[in-house]
Image (cartoon, rainbow, N blue to C red):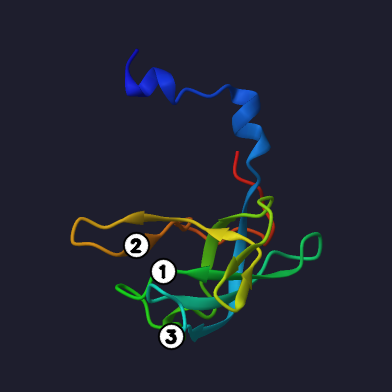
């Protein structure tokens, strides 16, 4: 069995992952994290509200660059303790060829809280 076959999920499994668009409303360095990170507060609109996330994105972003940007995040994972910070959503990104994480973002703004289809 190939790695691809072992990692195959059903469409119903995919639908269980709730990926939404949010807008960064606050961003600050998180120097206490084991790996360099930025603490984010992300607004997902009235249904979900503002959630916190710790994101290891310091190679390509400074906190002041992030405020106002839309990002994609998984909103239905259980909260995870990251040092002294409770991360409530998983901000999504891709590993850049030169290292570091590049955020997954839509190429046009969409309404906050919109679910990925």
- Mark 2 lies on residue: 101
Q: Which mark is residue 56?
A: 1
In the image, what residue occupies the spot 77% across and 61% down? 48
Image quadrant in which you'd find residue 110: bottom right
- Mark 3 lies on residue: 31
Per the model, the C-alpha gap separating discs 3 and 2 is: 17 Å
Name the spot of residue 17 as percent of width and height, x first.
63, 41
Give left or right: position of 27 versus 77.
left
Q: Quadrant of the C terminus?
A: top right
Q: Between residue 3 and residue 17, name the one nearer to us.
A: 3
Give left or right: position of 66 versus 75.
left
Give left or right: position of 31 versus 112.
left
Callout 3: 10 Å neighbours few (<14), some, many (20+)?
few
Asked whether the residues under the numbered discs 1 and 2 touch, taking CB atoms below 8 Å apart as contact, a structural biologist would say: yes
Q: Earlier in the sequence, mark 1 or mark 3?
A: 3
2 in relation to 37, above or below: above
Q: Earlier in the sequence, mark 1 or mark 2?
A: 1
Outermost residue toward the top? Answer: 1
In the image, what residue occupies the spot 43% across and 85% down? 31
In the image, what residue occupies the spot 58% across and 21% down? 10
Q: Earlier in the sequence, mark 3 or mark 2?
A: 3
């Amino acid at each position: 069995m190939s790695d691809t076959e072992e990692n195959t999920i059903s469409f119903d499994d995919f639908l269980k992952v709730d990926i939404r668009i949010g807008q960064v409303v606050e961003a600050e360095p998180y120097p206490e994290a084991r790996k360099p990170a930025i603490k984010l507060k992300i607004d997902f609109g009235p249904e979900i509200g503002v959630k916190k996330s710790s994101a290891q994105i310091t190679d390509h972003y400074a906190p002041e660059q992030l405020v106002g940007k839309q990002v994609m995040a998984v909103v239905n994972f259980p909260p995870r303790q990251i040092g002294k910070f409770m991360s409530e959503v998983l901000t999504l990104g891709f590993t850049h060829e030169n290292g570091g994480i590049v955020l997954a973002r839509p190429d046009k703004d969409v309404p906050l809280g919109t679910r990925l289809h």
